[in-house]
Image (cartoon, helix red, strand yellow):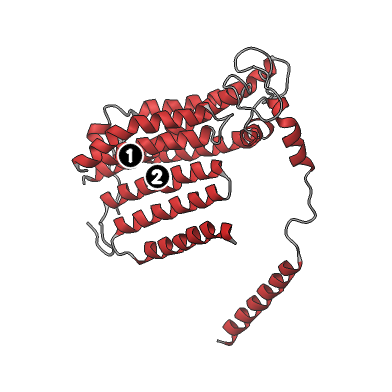
Amino acid sequence: MIEQIPHILVLLGLIVSAILTFHFKDLLAATLAAGLFGFLISLEFYILQAPDVAISQAAIGAGLTTAIFIIAIRATGRFEGESS
Amino acid sequence: MSRIVRTAADLLYPVILIFGLYIVAHGHLTPGGGFQGGAVIATGGALVIVAYSYKEISGWLKKNVLLGREVIGLVGFIGVGLLALAFGQVFFFNYLAGSGSLFGMPVPYGINAGELNTAGVIPLMNFAVGIEVWGGLTIVILYMLSGLEKEGC
Amino acid sequence: MKKMFVVVASLLILAAFFGVMAMTLTFGSPMVTDMDDYFLRHGQEQTGSNNQCTAVVFDFRAFDTLGESTVLFCGIMGAALMFRKMQGGEEYEDE
């Protein structure tokens, strides 16, 4: 039972960050919440003893996807419903 | 972006580059490999690309160099596999393992700390795939930024 | 409305059927581990690599890695082709 506690904490963090991604009207904050989601899922992969998958998930899910979304936000509006 | 982001990107880019090259070079000993190391290096490139504007970045991140890096990676990967035919083996055979030449040191059986000079063609394939992923994932972000500059914002 | 009800009810019955069928199976049995045992026993001396994950990906299953590299290459070439046409010369048509 004691070794289940990190799993439960990480999964609760996953649910909270997914809800925050859905909830934010500021798209930059929503992008950062999506990056937090990718980082937490890579932590879960590391806890499940798959460090290969954890490295590629941390590099692509938390790094490159966030960069692409930030470039897209720079080209359009920052808030939801606004067009620059 | 602001001066804080630019200074942090300048400081962090060599560190990320060295770490990614470490993951690629030690792919046959520690967790990781070509794809993971290339993705880590591309993340460092994405940090620099996000921090600066397109006019400043286009002087030292050339598109043709990145495209050539991707092509050289894929051709090198297939070439290492095809070179096994010259040794009289099948396609993708590990002809260098245990041969005593480059990356050919025989490895002791069981749990050991590992030696960098082992594993035959696996480090060569790691380098090829790492170079390919480095060029490929960087140039996608660079093309997105160039399309943004075209729109004028 | 009645059609909708029939569709939803049939979907629910189908889902319950598959759920019950999945409950009766035990996970991971019959356990077939011949290939795993072969890789773990002979992988180190055949490939000389201490990391068995890389040994499987780059040596035993190298055709899989070749396909993955080709898929990445084709995707990036498609993106480069699209943005190069938009960049050089003619205007990007916006209806």
Q: Are marks 2 and 1 in contact (CB under 8 Å)?
A: yes
Residue linked to disc 1: B47
Q: Quadrant of residue B17?
A: top left
Side (left or right) of B67 relative to C19: left
Residue linked to disc 2: A63
Residue farthest toward the bottom in the current orientation of the protein: C2
Q: Nearer the viewer, residue B50 or B66?
A: B50
User: Which residue is depicted at the point 68% across and 75% down?
Assistant: C16
In the image, residue A51 lies at what x, y percent? 54, 42
User: Which residue is depicted at the point 43% across and 31% down?
Assistant: B19
Within-10-Å neighbours for mark 1: few <14, some 14–19, many 20+: many
In the image, residue B39 lies at what x, y percent? 45, 37
Can you see residue B52?
no
Can you see residue B119?
yes
Answer above or below: position of C86 versus B99. below
Q: How many numbered discs, if any?
A: 2
Amino acid at circle 2: Gly
Q: Quadrant of residue A36?
A: bottom left
